[in-house]
Amino acid sequence: MWSPWTSRKPAPGRLTQSTSFSSSVTSSSKDHNGIVAVLDDDAAPAGAGGSGKIVLHRVRSSNKLRTCKSFAAASEAAAASVAGERRVVLYFTSLRAVRPTFEACRDVRAILRGLRVGVDERDVSMDAAFLAELRALMRRDRPTLPQLFVAGRLVGDADDVRTLHESGELRRVVAGAPLLPPTPCASCGGSRFSPCGACGGSHRRFNEKTGGFRVCTACNENGLVRCTACCSGG
């Protein structure tokens, strides 16, 4: 009545696995183990893969050493730029994009001017090199502004300066620093920057050999150079 195949029952132990599937699983597991062996720094080298892993460790170590040396050189250069006999250096921004930061920088500048102290003001929005200096000094990628340094030592941010000023300690901290000039600089008007004389402030110079323009190396990204009349010590 019924076809013979409908009455068949699956025989026990008849489950089989495709040879192609098993080979693919085996090869993929081998590849996975090889990737893990390369990426795992704590795994012990085995067989021929040991020499390759040693080379990998050497490359990583050399990269870390190179990074540490470059960071140390940048830190030393930044520390030398703010060091000096009772030298007062202020990192700030004149941009109004973030209102609390702008107001904090404005307050600190007003406090220092009220003390009649000559300040080496370094506007990070005018020159990216100032921001790189501050990052090396603070050892942070995104340091807060403003930051005040006296004689190469960090005084603090706006809250620290306000606290010292209210207690009267700030005058003692900046004692011995150069006095504020009675009149602004005649060359830059107190902005401490002037247009680059080599490119006229365009940050581009014409190259006669190639017939095109190239980046001017005498100025910063804004086509400005520090005023030599009032920033001779910076």
Image (cartoon, rainbow, N blue to C red):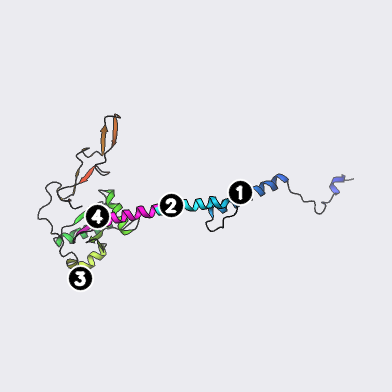
Mark nearest the camera among 1 and 3 is 1
Residue 137 point in image, percent of width and height: 30, 58
**Could you tell me the amino acid type at mark 4?**
Ser
**Which residue appears farthest toward the bottom when viewing the image?**
167
Magenta extent = 66-94
Residue 194: image quadrant is: top left
> Do tag 2 and tag 1 residues touch (Cβ < 8 Å)?
no
Question: Quick check: 188 left or right of 219?
Answer: left
Residue 30 appears in view: yes
The type of residue carrying mark 1 is Asp
The image position of residue 55, as x and y in percent, is 50, 50
Q: Which image quarter holds the N terminus? A: top right
Between tags 2 and 1, which lies in front? 2
Residue at numbered disc 4: 81
Magenta stretch: residue 85 in it? yes
- Could you say whether the residue bearing mark 3 is in a helix, strand or loop? helix
Hey, which quadrant is residue 218 in on the image?
top left
Q: Which amino acid does label 3 sit on?
A: Ser
In space, the residues marked 1 and 3 are separated at their CA atoms by: 68 Å
Count of marks, rendered view: 4
Q: Residue 31 carries which label?
A: 1
- Residue 122 placement, left or right of 25: left
Give the labeled residue for mark 3: 167
Other residues around mark 3 within 10 Å, as few (<14) / some (14–19) / many (≥20): few
Which residue lies at the image location 57% right of the left edge and 51% below the top edge? 49
